Image (spheres, rainbow, N blue to C red):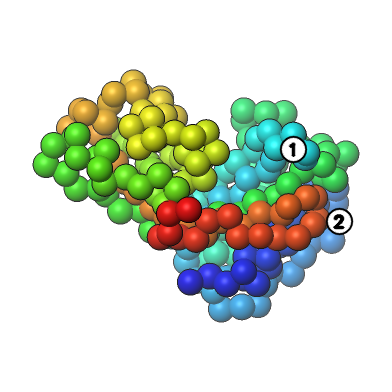
């Protein structure tokens, strides 16, 4: 369990890194709590305020580095999401910062591809679709925000990987699930709330 206080510090650290990277402000100190020294995956999402349109989302899906380092790398990378122009310093006051702290992805084992539908829980699971060099990831909150069911979520993840939406039926395709603790500002530099608890379906 990651506490709301840990989540608040994660979001504040991510925002501090963004402001340091984009505006040249002083680099913030990393949180001192032990959880931030554990190896965990993390994503940083930037949404415009108040329209809540996606402005950037990049992360480290695998637990290959300390959480504080994953947040730092994700925060810098989210400023340069290739789907959008680089984040400008005059946008900092009009973005909401969100941090997702991930559990380790695990392959969903099935005998028949149709079983994926029953094993995926919208609101709890994030998904990764992988086939050869193709790989795509969608965070659990994405399916909730778009109102997708399990099949739609699966298809969208396949397309995120650059594959056909029904590639999950291909036995060469591997589907992984993970969960996330998701924390977000309510408004720029505002109160931080918990959006999703890992392992819980809203």
**In this orientation, which residue lies closer to the viewer: 66 or 200?**
200
Which mark lies nearer to you, 1 or 2?
A: 1
Location of residue 135 (image quadrant):
top left
Q: Residue at x 85, y 51 (%)?
A: 24
Give neighbour class at mark 2: few <14, some 14-19, many 20+ (Cα, 10 Å): few
Task: Give the answer, above or below, for where 112 lies relative to 64.
Answer: above
For label 1, the SS is strand
Residue highlighted by disc 2: 25
64 relative position to 45: left or right: left
Location of residue 189 (image quadrant):
bottom right
**In this orientation, which residue lies closer to the viewer: 156 or 199?**
199
In this figure, what is the number of numbered marks?
A: 2
The x, y position of residue 178, in whole percent, is: 38, 53
Residue farthest to the left?
111
Task: Give the answer, above or below, for where 39 lies relative to 126.
Answer: below
Residue highlighted by disc 1: 48
Q: Residue at x 19, y 48 (%)?
A: 109
The span from disc 1 to disc 2 (Cα, nearest Å) is: 21 Å
Could you tell me if residue 17 is visible in this image? no
38 relative position to 18: left or right: left
Q: Residue at x 55, y 64 (%)?
A: 67
Give neighbour class at mark 1: few <14, some 14-19, many 20+ (Cα, 10 Å): some
The x, y position of residue 193, in whole percent, is: 66, 60
The x, y position of residue 75, in whole percent, is: 66, 50
The x, y position of residue 10, in whole percent, is: 65, 63
For label 2, the SS is loop
């Amino acid at each position: 369990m990651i506490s709301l206080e840990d989540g608040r510090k994660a979001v504040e650290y991510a925002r501090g890194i963004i402001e340091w990277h984009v505006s040249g402000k002083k680099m913030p100190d990393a949180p001192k709590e032990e959880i931030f020294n554990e190896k965990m995956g993390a994503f940083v999402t930037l949404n415009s305020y108040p329209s809540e349109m996606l402005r950037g989302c990049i992360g480290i899906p695998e637990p290959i580095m300390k959480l504080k380092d994953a947040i730092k790398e994700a925060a810098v990378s989210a400023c340069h999401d290739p789907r959008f122009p680089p984040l400008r310093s005059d946008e900092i006051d009009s973005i909401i910062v969100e941090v997702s702290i991930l559990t380790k992805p695990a392959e969903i084992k099935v005998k028949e591809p149709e079983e994926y539908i029953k094993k995926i829980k919208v609101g709890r699971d994030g998904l990764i679709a992988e086939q050869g060099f193709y790989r795509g990831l969608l965070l659990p909150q994405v399916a909730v925000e778009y109102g997708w069911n399990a099949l739609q979520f699966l298809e969208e993840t396949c397309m995120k990987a650059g594959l056909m939406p029904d590639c999950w039926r291909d036995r060469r395709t591997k589907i992984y699930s993970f969960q996330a603790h998701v924390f977000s500002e309510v408004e720029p530099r505002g109160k931080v709330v918990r959006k999703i608890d890992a392992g819980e379906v809203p």
